[in-house]
Image (cartoon, rainbow, N blue to C red):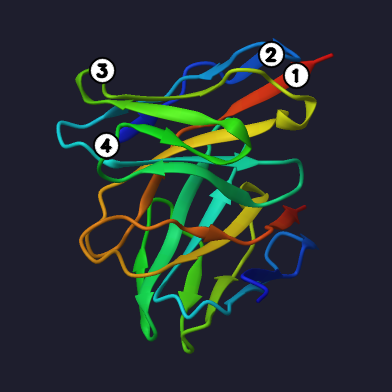
Amino acid sequence: AQSVTQLGSHVSVSEGALVLLRCNYSSSVPPYLFWYVQYPNQGLQLLLKYTTGATLVKGINGFEAEFKKSETSFHLTKPSAHMSDAAEYFCAVSYGGATNKLIFGTGTLLAVQP
Amino acid sequence: NAGVTQTPKFRVLKTGQSMTLLCAQDMNHEYMYWYRQDPGMGLRLIHYSVGEGTTAKGEVPDGYNVSRLKKQNFLLGLESAAPSQTSVYFCASSTQASGRSNEQFFGPGTRLTVL
């Protein structure tokens, strides 16, 4: 069965430091890839997605992610963390088809220290 | 344009009680989904629907039922609530995949506690 692995359930960075959140998927077929963000007591909001085309994808709030097929990875980065980036981040994959179902990773809680 | 809304926002039930969670979307989306979110487990799909009048089981369907009588609404029912169903429930919707994958839009969630 396809699965998504997010390394590190908790990540802490200093304000202004690089943010790197890791996501790997298990599938021989490249999926469609998503990063969602969840702020406290809110629903999920799409940060960015990769479907086809350029493998480096830019999203909202200065985040970007690169699809690396050879590494089955889709890591999320931001050059300089801001206090407002503190949230939980979920990587998800989909294989489209007739249901458009998403398979989520277990999430990474990002803390930003002043 | 409200997007995806969920009712209620919070609910406390006793074991054995029943309730229905309502999800409504005003984006004319074909597909709708119910997830539960538990600490350390991400979001898991309970049931989903690819159109009015159709429903299907997801990853964790036991103890839940759903109905999609109108395109804009997707109801999640708990017939006899159990403490293991204490969770945060999210509804989502999307357009048809049409050969690729489309973004799912999420509601704000319902926090359910079963005592």
Co-location on one chain, circles 2 and 3: yes
Q: Name which residue type carries label 2.
A: Ser
- Whichever of labels 2 and 4 marks the residue nearer the N terminus, that label is 4
Residue located at (24% from left, 65% from top): A98
Residue B34 image offset from top left, x and y in percent: 51, 62
Q: Are marks 2 and 1 in contact (CB under 8 Å)?
A: yes
Q: Residue A71: which numbered mark, if any?
A: 3
Q: Name which residue type carries label 4.
A: Gln
The quarter of the rendered structure image containing the N terminus of chain B is bottom right
Inter-mark Cα distance, 1 to 4: 31 Å
| Tag 3 subunit | A
Residue A68 located left or right of residue B76: left
For label 4, the residue is A2
Q: Quadrant of residue A81?
A: top right
Inter-mark Cα distance, 2 to 4: 28 Å
For label 2, the residue is A12
For label 1, the residue is A112
